[in-house]
Image (tube, rainbow, N blue to C red):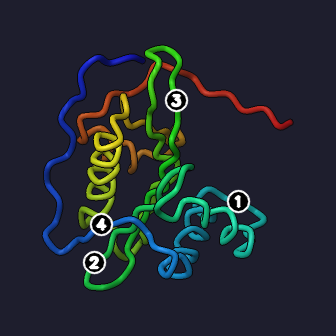
Amino acid sequence: MVRSAPRATVAWVPAKVHVEPISADQLEALLPLIGAYQRFYRVEDIDEGRNRAFFARFVAPSEDGMLLGAWRDGELAGYACLYWHFTSLVPAETVLMNDLYVAESFRNQGIGRALIEASAVVARDRGAHRLEWATQPSNLTAQRLYDRTGAERSEWVEYELEP
């Protein structure tokens, strides 16, 4: 779907939530949340060393993407992993929010909304055409949040092929 003008995104962010790029010093604190995200999606072989090596590429500054962390009361409550991505339809850069996860004890407190808003700001600051993301059709909780952000559901159907 191609949209010519960006729509408004979520404006409400809880005052006690702080979102910023994950630094190299914060990567270790992020790894348990990455593992929890993977368990949520039933990944069978979670390897912290592989996660550390893979996600280190997104520590700012990065040519590949960005990790955003959301802190509440000094505790890492959630994260978003952004990939710099492209669309040939416009053609332009887009930002793909590949991962969005909030720890169970912090859900329904505005953390997910804050991460989406911060991701949209990153996309705007990069001059990206849009911020895009996907979720499993069965993840209705996430879809309720996404439907309140001003985002539009894509008409595209995704496919996967193992090489």
Q: Residue at x 29, y 40 (%)?
A: 124
Tag 2 or tag 4, which sits nearer the N-term? 4
Residue reaching furthest bottom? 74
Q: Nearer the viewer, mark 1 or mark 3?
A: 3
Using the image as rendered, state which of residue 84 and residue 158 is in the foreground: 84
Image x and y of residue 125, in percent: 29, 44
Quadrant for the N terminus, please: top left
User: Label 2 neighbourhood size at 10 Å, few (<14), some (14-19), many (20+)?
Assistant: some
User: Looking at the picture, does residue 143 appear above or below residue 76?
Assistant: above
Label 4 sits on residue:
19
Q: Is residue 87 above or below residue 80?
A: above
User: Which mark is in front, 3 or 2?
Assistant: 3
Q: Which residue is mark 3?
A: 86
What SS does tag 4 mark?
strand
Amino acid type of the residue that numbered disc 3 sits on in the rendered structure: Phe
| Residue 43: mark in rendering | 1
Residue under label 2, please give it: 72
